[in-house]
Amino acid sequence: MRKAKTILGILGMAMLGFCAISVMAAQGDFSGTWALDKQKTHGLPKDLKSYTMVVTQNEQQIVIDTKLEGEAQAKANDSHVGGGGYLGSVGGGGGGFAAGTLALSIVNPRVTYSLDGKETTAGGSSNVTNKFKAKRSKDGKTLDLSIVMTDTTPMRTGATESIKERWTLSADGAALKVQRSVSTASGVDAITLIFGKGTSGTPAPQQ
């Protein structure tokens, strides 16, 4: 009898684990290492070397660690809210950025979104306030993410930049399409990125 109860207990725990995995799969699990597929992504800046995301997800939140390598990112490091640089007109002359470059120039190394649909607030640098929001589709295959960054320095109070992304998983979960748009005082730019799931690329650093 005691042996039978033990077996039933083990089977029960296995069933609970299976149900938890099934629920996560039904909701859409974006977890894993995602490396940009440069052959399937169009309109990339010529100097972009790599773009890798390490995504950790549970029922409460999703954490995204990003590593972007390339000269375009280096040029734009000081051009975001709170920085001292200036982003030129998208695709224009006079030092402007080519289409797609602005959309990739503002990337947060680590972002945490709550998956309860509520907006969360966190400090960026000492002069920037960030507001994050995530919204999942009913089938869990699509995830809408948004960040609004507001500068609070005396000379730039109220200046904002925003990032919006729509993530869509392929049917087999092996590919991720990210529709990304960035809006700044210099203009609005958008790009569609295709990522493959795996261990290729350099994992993003943990902070």
Image (tube, grey):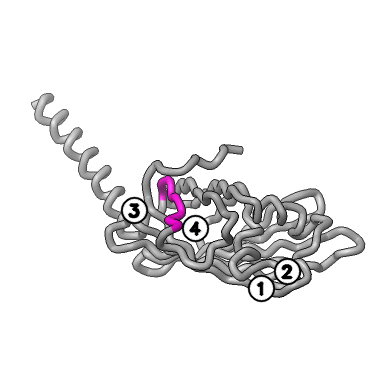
Q: Helix, strand or loop at disc 4?
A: loop
Tell me which corner region of the image, top left, top right, bottom left or bottom right, holds residue 151.
bottom right
- Comes first in the chain, label 2 or label 1: 1
Q: Amino acid at mark 1?
A: Gly
From the image, state whether disc 3 or disc 1 is nearer to you.
1
Q: Are marks 3 and 4 in contact (CB under 8 Å)?
A: no
Q: Dividing the image into 4 quarters, which one contains the N terminus?
A: top left
- Comes first in the chain, label 2 or label 4: 2
Residue 206, x across and y down, in percent: 57, 37
Q: Are marks 2 and 1 in contact (CB under 8 Å)?
A: yes
Whether residue 62 is visible here, answered yes or no, is: yes
Res 115 label? 4
Specify start and end residues of the magenta stretch as a single range. 31-38
Res 96 label? 2
Q: Helix, strand or loop at disc 2?
A: loop
Q: Which of the two residues, 166 or 76, is positioned nearer the viewer here? A: 76
Q: Dividing the image into 4 quarters, which one contains the C terminus?
A: top right
Q: Helix, strand or loop at disc 3?
A: helix
- Comes first in the chain, label 2 or label 3: 3
Res 91 label? 1
From the image, state whether disc 4 or disc 1 is nearer to you.
1
Disc 4 from disc 1: Cα separation: 35 Å
Res 24 label? 3
Disc 3 from disc 1: Cα separation: 41 Å
